[in-house]
Every structure is written in C-alpha cells, then in structure tokens.
Amino acid sequence: MSNFSLTVLIEINGVMTKAGSITGTDYKDAVFAYDDSYTAEKNHRPISISLPLSKKPFSAESTRNYFEGLLPEGFTRKSIADSMHSDPDDYISILRELGRECLGAIQIVDESIRTVEADYKELSKKEVKALAKEGASLAANLVIQSHLSLTGASGKTGLYYDEKKKKWYQPVGSAPSNFIVKQSHVRLSNIVVNEQLCLLTAKKLGIDVPESFVVQTGKNKTEDADILFATKRYDRVVTDDSRKVKDLPVPYRLHQEDFAQALGINSSQKYEKNGEHYLKQMFNIIRSYSANPIEDQFKLWRITVFNFLVGNTDNHIKNYSLLYNKDLRTVRLAPCYDVVAARVYKNDINEMSLSINGKLNMDEVTRADFELEAKSCGLGTKPAMKIFDEVHNGLLEALKESAGELEGKGFAQAGDIADKIKRRGVIHHDNSLMPKN
C-alpha cells in the first residue's frame, strides 16, 4: 500500500461524521489527523482521550496505539491477514478491510472502495451450530465476510439477534451487530458456562454487567461444541426512531474506548509487567473525565476486588472500558465484561494482569495490600475496604445461587465450576484477606 488515505468517521447523535484521516505510505508511518471541519465545531469531542483535538497530525506510535486497538488479536487476526495475503503486523491493511463496523462508534472507510449496502443475512440453525462446532476458523470467516472488527482473542464474532423471533443474522457492510458471540471449546473447557457464572455472580454483588446468555445449538448442554456465549452489546442501543433494515431496528452506535486506548498504550502491552501501576492510571482517567467520577471510581474498585476474589487473572486494561453517550459529551465507566475464573483450570494460575500494591501474584496479596492500593489510587481506605468486605463476604452465596440458576437450566457443569472456584480461588475465611477484629 502506498500514499493511502483512510477516512475516520464517528457516529454522533446517529449521524456518521468525518473526524479525520489516517494517511501514510505504509503501516509503519501511518499518522492520524483531525479534519479542520471537525476541530472547528466547538461541540465536537476527541475520538479518544489519548488523541485530544489538535490541528497537528499525531505520531505514528500514537496513531497505532489507538487504531490497532480496534482490531482482533491472535488467531482471528492471523486468519484475516492470511486471507488478504498480508502481514499480520500491517494493521492499516486489516483496518481498511474490517473498519466499517468496530467497537464503539468509529468507522474506517477507504473511499476508493465501493460501499457495501448495509444488510442482515439470516443464519440458519445449521450455520449457528457450525459456529459453535467449528469455532475460531468459522468466526474468522464471518469477521472477514462482515468486514467487522472486534478486539480480543480468537473465537469471537459480532452478530445481530432478533430477540422477539429468536433469530440470528450476520451483519453485512456497515450494518451494526448487537451481540458479541463467543465459542467455548476453542479456548478452555466449559469457558462459556464459566463466564456466564461469573457475570451472574458479579451482578448479584452489585456490579453492572451486560445482558448475556448461553446459546444452545445442540442437544447436549454440557458439550462445548454445542454451546455459544452471547453478550448484548452495551455500545449499541435501539430507540423508537431507529431506522430499519428488513424490518429489523438498526441500533445506534455509542462510542467506547478501552483503557489501553485511553491511556495510549499498545495492545501488546495490555498486561502489566514492570511496575507500570495501570490501576492507578485508570483511576486518574476516571477522576479526570468521568461525568460521575466518585461513583465510577467505586464501581471500578468493586470490579477489581471481584476479579481478584473470583480468580480472573485475565483482568488486563483492554477488559475495562469507557462508554460515551450519543453526543460524546458524557463519559462513564462501561459495564464489566470478559470475566472468567481462570484458576478453575489450573491451581498455579496466579499472576494477575493488574498489580495490587505492586504485587501480581494473587497468592501473595493480603488485605493490607488492598488498603495500600486503595490509598495509592486516591480512594478513601474506609469506603474502599467496606466494598472489599461486601464482595468478599457475599461471594460464596452469590456463587452458589448463580450456579443453582444455571444448573436449573440444564448446565450441570456450573456446580462443578463453582466448587473449583471455592477450592482454587482466594476465598478463605482464615487468611489475611479477612478484616482484623
């Protein structure tokens, strides 16, 4: 690719608006600059906290850190690059192919390419079953066919679900999806039920989570190849004035960015390794930009405590996001997502992705470390530790209730997963996590 120009659009109050362009000769020197018409409008807001409104182009590094953060990772990204005969590192070529439907309200458009009309293609039960059975390979193909970009690892795609008719559709062109669908067996055994169990438990403990459910595609609810995990997209909303395609209401796009993007950190550095103190940086972002910083700080703290206690070691900074309203003027902490009790699979999975008082090994973290972390993050120690105790003391009962609900729906493995969380987690009533009398 040489002397390319990609248009960056963002949806504001339902209208796709040109924010700027990405230009360069290849992915190594690609730079983003806001359009003069965008910066001239006093009500317009930046597309990212890390890319404040400016009349000057951003560096190639800053450009890559934000826009590469819109792309899939791992197997899906490699599959897409292979299908394009492209280098997986060439994020610009992949973005050019997939950028019509990203997370949040961003669209990346090559105006030299004919626009594909927005549409929804109904998926048969056989096709949905194949998505569960064939896993990451078919998910990658759907991503390519839909020109749809979702961040994260393999086995994930965006689909449209008609909740009234209980039918699934593949988005085409710039048509928005409204659910993110994941496969189970391509990653870890029973991971779909594991994630649903964790989210149900989190909700019972006062944590805001997106609507989600397990999709049964076969007769056996305990077979990974017969189930999918569906999460309703909180960055897509349907209102009374939503336009329709094939009698399906088309969602408005709400903008979002994960904390790696907001902090200007590349996706490859999403795991804390060298004392970067990501959690403190996240709290600083909330204090500076949230429309309700006090409430959102304690929401983030509650999620942090829960992830630790349930044994979610994949709690990296791309698994936390900020959500904007329709006009981009209000920013709040997004609902909790991508929560899996990783220690269910191995006793020695103990290295977290965010440190607590400088410690990444969860077996070394004590109550005192949480107190010091709260202080370092600018929280009052007393209210922070009250939340800690609420989550700690309520977790086992919430876990038991959630497992019972899933077992009642035929997912017998939920009880075993809950038992493993208890045995392999960090919930012990005789350890240093308990308050001192």
Image (cartoon, rainbow, N blue to C red):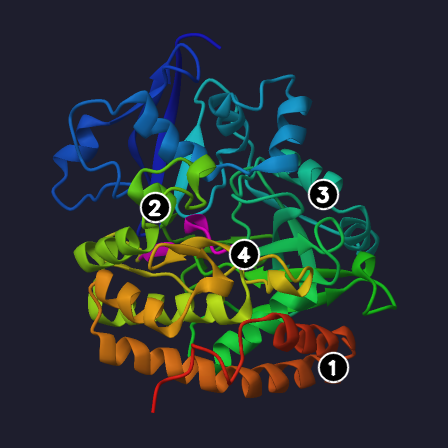
At label 2, counting other C-alpha atoms closer than 10 Å, the crowd grade (few under 14, some 14-19, many 20 or more) is: few
In this orientation, which residue lies closer to the viewer: 188 or 405? 188
Nearest-to-viewer mark from 4 and 3: 3
Q: CA distance from mark 2 to mark 3?
A: 34 Å
- Judging by the rendered image, the residue that carries numbered circle 3 is 136
Q: Mark 2 or mark 3: name the one nearer the start of the chain.
A: 3
Q: Horizontal and vertical percent for residue 168?
A: 68, 57
- Disc 1 residue type (three-letter): Glu
- Verify whether residue 36 appears in magenta: no
Q: Horizontal and vertical percent for residue 249?
A: 52, 58
- Judging by the rendered image, the residue that carries numbered circle 2 is 275
Q: CA distance from mark 4 to mark 3?
A: 20 Å
Q: CA distance from mark 2 to mark 1?
A: 41 Å
Q: Which residues are magenta?
A: 313-324
Screen quadrant of the C terminus = bottom left
Q: Mark 2 or mark 1: name the one nearer the start of the chain.
A: 2
In this orientation, which residue lies closer to the viewer: 65 or 420? 420
- Judging by the rendered image, the residue that carries numbered circle 1 is 407
Q: CA distance from mark 1 to mark 3?
A: 27 Å
Label 3 sits on a secondary structure element that is helix
Are the residues flagged by discs 2 and 1 in contact, CB closer than 8 Å? no
The residue furthest right is 219
Are the residues flagged by discs 4 and 3 in contact, CB closer than 8 Å? no
Q: Horizontal and vertical percent for residue 229?
A: 66, 61
- Disc 3 residue type (three-letter): Ala
Label 1 sits on a secondary structure element that is helix
Nearest-to-viewer mark from 2 and 1: 2
- Judging by the rendered image, the residue that carries numbered circle 4 is 178
